[in-house]
Amino acid sequence: MMDQRERILGCACDLYLQGGLDGFSMRKLAREVGITAPAIYRHYDGREEVLSDVLREAHRTFARYLYAALGEPTALERFSGAGEGYLNFVIEHPRWYGIMHMAPEQLGMDVLPSDIEAMQSAIHQFWIDRVRECMQSGILKDGDPEMASITMWAHAHGMVQLFHEGCLPVTEEEFRMLFKASGARLMAGVATEEFAKDLEGMVPEEVDIGMKTG
């Protein structure tokens, strides 16, 4: 059964994503949760503290999805496992993924709490490390692992945004296939010649989609 904190965080995320900061108040949040306004102040001092906790929980969960790949035995399996974890998270937790990419000022904060910044930095470094070890293993071409990581993240994030915004009229399962096929094409461009040949047989079945704009 969902506990009170989980319900508050879930309602807070929904309330913020529906109306932004201007539409977010502790009184509205209490109403959504089904408790009195004074009762919610027993949990949090104000909306900034609530939204900080939403971000904190989102990043913790995201990290768990990613870091599970560290148990894999090879660089390629760790890289692929991390990609699978990312894909599972963005499909299973679209609200959290959305709020994780809001600027601090959009959340009513001057800066993010230091522990959340530390989690973001750790996740960023995690991706760089996966790319670096793939380069060292001869899977990816030599280069700057940080810049390659940013390129890959930009591609993945763009695909996810198109899906979440309804620009890709596909089911979740079709999006999984599309995401992996597009990712394999990107990988073919940055892979070593030997591994690029292996990728030719790894591209999933094509998905027929109609693009929406606007």
Image (cartoon, rainbow, N blue to C red):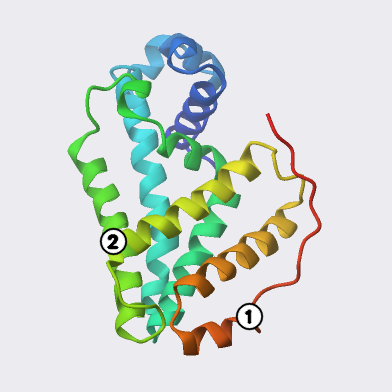
Crowd around label 1: few <14 · some 14–19 · many ≥20 (10 Å): few
Residue 129 in the image: state x and y as whole percent.
Answer: 29, 69
Q: Nearer the viewer, residue 108 or 186?
A: 186
Residue 198, picture quadrant: bottom right
In the rendered view of the protein, which quadrant contains the C terminus? Answer: top right
Along the horizontal axis of the image, is 173 left or right of 59? Answer: right
**Which residue is pictured at 60% across the width and 51% down the height?**
91
Residue 83 in the image: state x and y as whole percent.
Answer: 49, 65
Q: Amino acid at mark 1?
A: Met
Whole-number angstrom distance, CA of label 1 to CA of label 2: 25 Å
Q: Secondary structure at mark 1?
A: loop
Question: Label 1: which residue?
Answer: 202
Crowd around label 2: few <14 · some 14–19 · many ≥20 (10 Å): some
Would you say the residues marked 1 and 2 are in contact, meaning their CB atoms lie under 8 Å apart?
no
**Which residue is pictured at 21% across the width and 48% down the height?**
118
Looking at the image, residue 64 lies above or below residue 159: below
Looking at the image, residue 94 lies above or below residue 5: below
**Which residue is pictured at 42% across the width and 52% down the height?**
61
Q: Secondary structure at mark 2?
A: helix
Q: Nearer the viewer, residue 20 or 166?
A: 166
Residue 68 in the image: state x and y as whole percent.
Answer: 41, 69
Q: Amino acid at mark 2?
A: Glu
Question: Label 2: which residue?
Answer: 146
Looking at the image, residue 97 lies above or below residue 188: above
Q: Nearer the viewer, residue 129 or 44?
A: 129
**Which residue is pictured at 37% across the width and 37% down the height?**
55
Residue 163 in the image: state x and y as whole percent.
Answer: 65, 45
Number of numbered discs visible in the structure rendering:
2
In the rendered view of the protein, which quadrant contains the N terminus? Answer: top right
Q: Earlier in the sequence, mark 1 or mark 2?
A: 2
